[in-house]
Amino acid sequence: MKFYKYILTLIAVLVFGFLGGQVNAQEISETEITFGSEYDFHTASTSRIYADNLSSSKFVVVYQDGGASVDQGTAIMADVSGDIISYSSEYVFNSGNTDYLSVTALSENKFAVAYQDKSNSNYGTVIMGDVSGDVITFGSEYIFNTAYTDHISVTALSDNKFVVAYQDNRDGVKQGKALVADVDGAAVSFGNAYTFNTSVTNYTSLSVLSSDKIIVAYQDGGNSDYGTAAIGVISGQAIDFGSEYVFNPSATSHIAPVVLSETKFAIAYQDRGGSLNYGRAIIGNVLGNAIAYGAEYVFNTGATSYVAASLLSKNKFAISYQGNSGLDYGNAIIGMVADDAINFGSKYIFNPASTGCSSVAALSDSQFAIAYQNKSGNLNYGRAVIGSIPVEEIVEPEPEPIPEPEVEAITMNDGDLIRNPNAEGSTKFDIYIVKIVGAQKFKRLILSPSVFESYEHLKWEDVQDVDQTTMDEYTLSNLVRAEGDEKVYQLFPSGDTGTKEIMDQGYDSDSIYTVNSIDINSYE
């Protein structure tokens, strides 16, 4: 049973709680950013800009084209050579008023766009784009929500599956919902919509943790606009959302999650607490569909808007934002992650003029693109720029032998919890409960974290580490009886699940454990 990381995460959260919630950012030399020239991709009013990379040398930008006061949905391809950007022609995917755009690449030659079609009753709509060279061919439009839809975010699960999260303003409720879409060529089919927040949901932003797990971060209007996140586990087109976890207990906007691994993510955001609007970021750790957070880290101590972020490597990410310190310049900064701590480098200006909405798309572990609205002279042109950081030279140190930790002799009592952290493979995470009857000593495996937590008297901090010699002193028992039931079952665990069989005779009654309904029902 994989409890070890779970316990470490809980300890880390407690330590951060004792030390305080906020830690100021520190500069580190590896985070210097150099920018190439700025390149206009649309020389008219441009907004709702969103970009995603198709490869290390190509990215796609979708945006609202306000040049003819139509606000039609448009896309363009960008090719990168060094820090030089060249563009394809512009391609219109929705000739009507288009809002709340989001784009995700499914492969090097296919992407999905999700948006609010204001020219069609504000319905939530998606469309597939196929790329051949710098030519984009769009398929048909597919409606995923036949109601007023905004705050849309889309992310790919695979080359033929993606997820859309959005605010469903059905009957004025404005709930947060998500659904899975399957792609067959340019055709799209949708699963049912699943609610992750039953109250007003704004600034929805979605990222994928793995092929069957997502994180959705948002502003919870039903809980004082707090910054909140939830984990969704996907099976086919079904989504099972866990509990909601607040990452910022004050008003939160411009939310941008970045996935670091299958069990760790960062969220950058605008913290509106105290009307300061600081730019902050935080690390979240995932166990199942539960989230535990580290401390909050400040990346900008002035008013901050239009926060966007993208992963560069497993411990490094780039943030773009508008620094509202009077000039509204476009800024970027690099965050370095170590465990649950974030160190930020210096901030660098990529647009020395008033900058509106922006989106950042990583191209490699040392290069990224920022697409943004240039508000200089009230032109609101769409522009992009390439940012680069030094290539990190990694020298692997010679591994040093790790001595076996000495485990002190422990006197066990009936009901104690034990584990051998030095056991082979995944068994190092297995936790057992001790039973002592006279001279007989038994141990029984606790199947999973949910079973453990179903017993209110069991505490994680009470688990004792023992050596294998001590562990072998206890006879393994797999016999149980449910509370209020005389039937005796033999259990056969398999990972975090298992099966059970009724025993009629031939067992030692002293070895039988009495269990609760959650425990017994965890076995088929």
Image (spheres, rainbow, N blue to C red):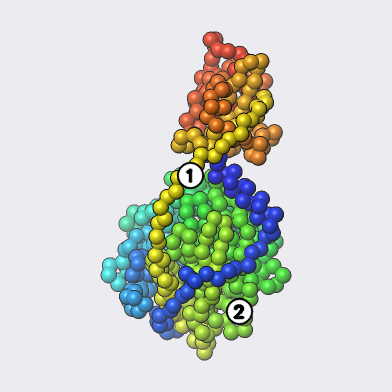
The amino acid marked with disc number 2 is Asn
Residue 355 visible in the picture:
yes
Discs 1/2, front: 1
Residue located farthest toward the top when viewing the structure as drawn: 505
Rendered image: mark on residue 402: 1
Verify CB contact (< 8 Å) between mark 1 and mark 2.
no
| Disc 2 secondary structure class | loop
Above/below status of 514 relative to 223: above
Give the residue drawn at x 41%, y 66%: 392
Q: Position of residue 314 (x, y in %)?
A: 45, 58
| Disc 1 secondary structure class | loop
Which residue is more in the foreground, 36 or 95?
36
The amino acid marked with disc number 1 is Ile
Which residue is more in the foreground, 358 or 490?
490
- Neighbor class of circle 1 (other Cα within 10 Å; few <14, some 14-19, many 20+) is few
Residue located farthest toward the right when viewing the structure as drawn: 274
Give the residue drawn at x 57%, y 56%: 340
- Earlier residue among tags 1 and 2: 2
Which residue is more in the foreground, 91 or 513?
513
Give the residue drawn at x 54%, y 14%: 503
What is the spatial separation of the Cα atoms under label 1 and label 2, in whole angstroms?
Answer: 50 Å
Rendered image: mark on residue 324: 2
Give the residue drawn at x 72%, y 70%: 274
Q: Position of residue 12 (x, y in %)?
A: 61, 51
- Neighbor class of circle 2 (other Cα within 10 Å; few <14, some 14-19, many 20+) is some
Above/below status of 492 relative to 173: above
Q: Quadrant of residue 344?
A: bottom right
Q: Quadrant of residue 81?
A: bottom left
